Amino acid sequence: MNNDTALQLARRIANRELSVTEVTEAALATAHADELGAYTFIADEDALATAAELDRRLVAGETPGPLFGVPCPVKDLAQVAGWPFEAGSVAFAGNRAEVDSGIVTRLREAGLVLIGKTATPEFGLPCYTEPVGRTPASTPFDRRRGAGGSSGGAGAAVAGGSVPIAHGSDGGGSIRIPAAACGLVGLKATRGRVSLGPLGVDGPGLVSEGVLTRDVSDTAAALTALAPGWPGDPYPPGPVPDFLAGLGKPGRLRIGVLTDPVIVDQAPVHPEALAAVRRTIGLLEELGHQVGAAPRPFGEAEWAAFTALWSVGALGVPVPEELESSLRPLTRWLRGLGRETSGQAYAAALTAAQRTTRNTALAWDEFDAVLTPTLAQPPAVHGELCDEQDPAGDFTAQCRFTPWTSIANLTGRPSLSLPLHTADVDGTALPFGVLLTGRWGEDGLLLALGAQLEAANGGWPTPGE
């Protein structure tokens, strides 16, 4: 079972080869044995009760959906009624959710069995998952290195084999960064394609909910399940297509390529990150696609709008004044920037972000997708990015590590990370992801291209290969 994709596992359940209870028990056992820092809470009783109910529904003749009975953990930035909701912060220690987040409702409606909570850094702010008092989330390719963030626990859970799919969220790369670090598939959908409602608010539209998986088909099936909106959504996405059924040949596409950093003017790019792009170019050309250079759509000065929006978002987390000092230095620094941002400055940042969105469309819309590395470097060694003494330097180091991912968050575009390359780094085979960023609303085309590359590559490497 540990090697099955989510769709394969669901088919085995539908064919009565396995019961939901058997699958859930196996997932719980593996989760309890986790040594990668993936989980913060494991919900044995709730998960087994859900599994028993789903088994009863199957016996009663229900036609199961494509993800029915598959175990799935929830990132600890979403609420599950009765479960711990600590958001990676000691300031929220002992807090429990009273209701389900909307994304949790959608996961339940898809027939997924929620088995627990996965680790996230404080409020999901950094691109590493090293919460205070817990084992840092590690990539199974090299446990000295992090699983990325902020959905690092989710990435470790899927790559470690306890589940084939895990909930995540992405505000600056937080699904795609762990996907690259853990050798997984990760999609940030078009802004508004997956609603943050009915409890969450979209604010400047940086964040998208989603999943991490082992293959593109699972991601497509999950997007169909998660895409129905909620009343009052600010970005009505229209009818929900069957993204899984749409994974046919995408036709001959025009792909742009960019390997220069974007959100920072200077960042070293590892030779194997560039090799991952070259390998992808070769596959694209073999598949008949047209490949050419893409321009840098904006620079560090324009990206400053993201920092303003991000810091005000950090400040918006309701932390009691007496607990402010318990926050991590990076969190306090970002919240301090938020306090210094006037209403006028925030409005100017929103305007600048919209202008950058339009300029990116002018630069990139001639391409069906733009190819970049996902990360500038291999998965970071634990502690390499985190700097408690210099939070501003910490933030800069993160930007240099991820100089492409937040383009899609600032502009709202769909963006897909694929594990198309592995290479030896210091004696260990490590994954290097590539990022395909599409036009607004063309999630289906991006997934179809991803599935085509997956097939051409013969699947993806796993730890130890």
Image (tube, rainbow, N blue to C red):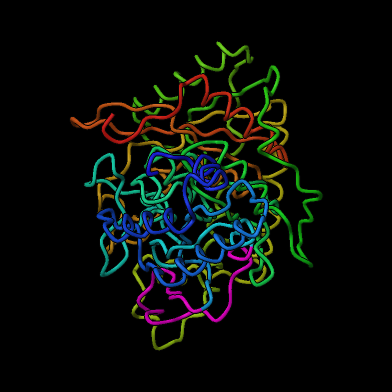
Q: Position of residue 26 (x, y in %)?
A: 36, 54
Q: Tell me what residue is drawn at x 64 percent, y 66 percent.
A: 102
Residue 219 on the magenta segment: no
Q: Tell me what residue is drawn at x 34 percent, y 34 percent.
A: 462
Vertical side of 146 occupied by 233: above or below: below
Image mark count: 0
**Residue 224 in view (yes/no):** yes
Please indicate whether residue 333 sits to the left or right of residue 436 in the image. Answer: left
Vertical side of 451 occupied by 307: above or below: below
Q: Position of residue 455 (x, y in %)?
A: 52, 23
Which of the pair 359/404 is nearer the observer? 404
Which of the pair 176/101 is nearer the observer? 101
Q: Give the main secondary structure, helix, strand or loop, of the magenta stretch.
A: loop
Vertical side of 401 occupied by 259: above or below: above
Which of the pair 19/207 is nearer the observer? 19
Q: Tell me what residue is drawn at x 59 percent, y 49 percent.
A: 409
User: Which image quarter: residue 445?
Assistant: top right
Q: Quadrant of the C terminus?
A: top left
**Residue 411 in view (yes/no):** no
Residue 86 on the magenta segment: yes
Q: Quadrant of the N terminus?
A: top left
Which of the pair 391/19 is nearer the observer? 19
Please indicate whether residue 398 sits to the left or right of residue 257 in the image. Answer: left
Q: Position of residue 428 (x, y in %)?
A: 22, 32
Q: Tell me what residue is drawn at x 54 percent, y 60 percent.
A: 55
User: Which image quarter: residue 346?
Assistant: bottom right
Question: Farthest bottom residue?
Answer: 322
Question: Over which residues does the magenta segment extend?
Answer: 82-105
Q: Position of residue 2 (x, y in %)?
A: 37, 44
